[in-house]
Image (tube, grey):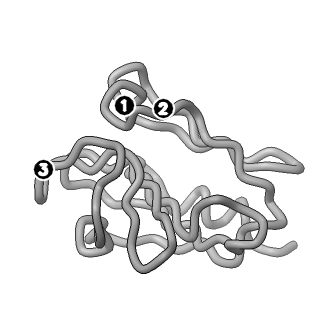
Amino acid sequence: MATVRVEPGEVVVHLSPGERLGALHGDLHIPRAAIRAATVTSEPYSLVRGLKVPGTGWPGSIALGTWRHQGSRDFFAVRGKGPAVVLDLDPASSRYRRVVVTLDDPGAVVRQLAPA
């Protein structure tokens, strides 16, 4: 399962070796200034839209990699049925518009990113 580490200047999405293979992608390093919002969803598969290029997907079971939709890109590291953190990003500061990652406690990431 992927992990999300909140650091002073960036958020790092660390993928497991299997996720790296399925997503055809390495870890993501997202500048904190690029994050517009962080929320939790219990239905991460409902956010999957567009074409998977590149990545691995099976409806309701796995979404790993990049999905392209109407000129933007979303990144998914979603496996199983658990909740996920959703990071909405500034497209001018990041190659992705949204990053969605299943985690045991996505609320912890949202709390860490909340303004002080």
Rendered image quadrant of residue 5: top right
Check disc 1 and report its element: helix, strand or loop.
helix
Question: Which residue in the protein does label 2 denote?
Answer: 15
Check disc 2 and report its element: helix, strand or loop.
loop
Mark toward the start of the polypeptide (2 vs 3) = 2
What amino acid type should be assigned to the residue bearing mark 1?
Glu
Toward the viewer: 14 or 72?
72
Give the class, few, some or many, for how many residues have Cα within 10 Å of label 3's Cα (few <14, many ≥20): few
- Circle 1/circle 2 CB separation < 8 Å: yes
- Residue 75 horizontal side relative to residue 21, left or right: right
How far is disc 1 from disc 2 in space, using C-alphas? 6 Å
Give above or below for 65 relative to 100.
Answer: above
What amino acid type should be assigned to the residue bearing mark 2?
Leu
Check disc 3 and report its element: helix, strand or loop.
strand
What amino acid type should be assigned to the residue bearing mark 3?
Trp
Question: Which residue in the protein does label 1 denote?
Answer: 19
